[in-house]
Image (tube, rainbow, N blue to C red):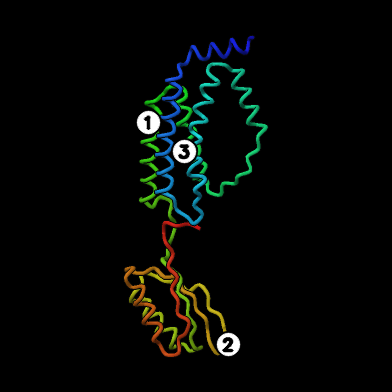
Amino acid sequence: MEFLALNSDVSRQVPWQLILLSCLLSFLLAQIIAVTYERTYQGMSYSRALFQSLALISILSSMLMFAIGNSLARGLGIAGVFAIIRFRTNLRDPRDIVFIFASLSIGIGCGIQAFGLAIAGTVVFCAAAFYLRYVPLGVRQNFDGLLRFSAPSMPEISERVEGILKESCQRFSLVTMREVAQGERLEFAYQVKLKDTSYTEAIVFMIRHLEDVRGVSLMMQETTVEL
């Protein structure tokens, strides 16, 4: 009887129209968060399941806030239930966790009827995510790519290669140099910072046409993608 009375009190305090509005608004705002995650994602392991989870988890957090209300006992009970459940999904990127918390925060804001806070927070969060996507804050990269080739064990070849690199690169650094073909040839690896990205094909062409130079490759690394 007490349980039924408690449920009836809750239903009288919170109209179902308000609950529906809160859930729909949280779902809409969470979709904006999910689209922002998709458009600003950097990497090679994008998950569609995480995208959909971001859109759905806000509804759950909004419903929980309505279920808890002002009752400390209910809050502790729900916390105990979630403590029993063990989530075994591993999130490799800390940025994924940030977006999950953003979606949860939107649901909490809608659940306590702080609609203005939820909308303003969504706008600010998405704007900050796009800003960090296109402004290379935190990028630490001194070189554009790695140049590899093999050449005869002759000082003249190294001098000619470095002459080409001085013309087309802002700076370069010899990473490795090792003997191959029983000491008859040397394999070189240079880190290069090009003066202009349009020099990519030109530098490969010039080094490839040096006498007896083989296996020329230039592996460029995108400054915004971290593996």
Q: Which label belongs to residue 62?
A: none
Q: Which residue is mark 2?
A: 181
Q: Secondary structure at mark 1?
A: helix
- Residue drawn at (60%, 88%), measured in percent from left and top? 182
Q: CA distance from mark 2 to mark 1?
A: 66 Å
Q: Nearer the viewer, residue 148 or 175?
A: 148
Q: Which residue is mark 3?
A: 55
Within 10 Å of the Cα at label 1, are there few (<14), some (14-19), or many (20+) other Cα atoms?
Answer: some
Q: Earlier in the sequence, mark 3 or mark 1?
A: 3
Q: Nearer the viewer, mark 3 or mark 2?
A: 3
Residue 20 in the figure: left or right of residue 168 = right
Q: Nearer the viewer, residue 86 or 188?
A: 86
Tell me the amino acid under the disc marked 3.
Ala
Q: Nearer the viewer, mark 3 or mark 1?
A: 3
Q: Which residue is mark 1?
A: 119
Q: CA distance from mark 3 to mark 1?
A: 15 Å
Q: CA distance from mark 3 to mark 2?
A: 58 Å
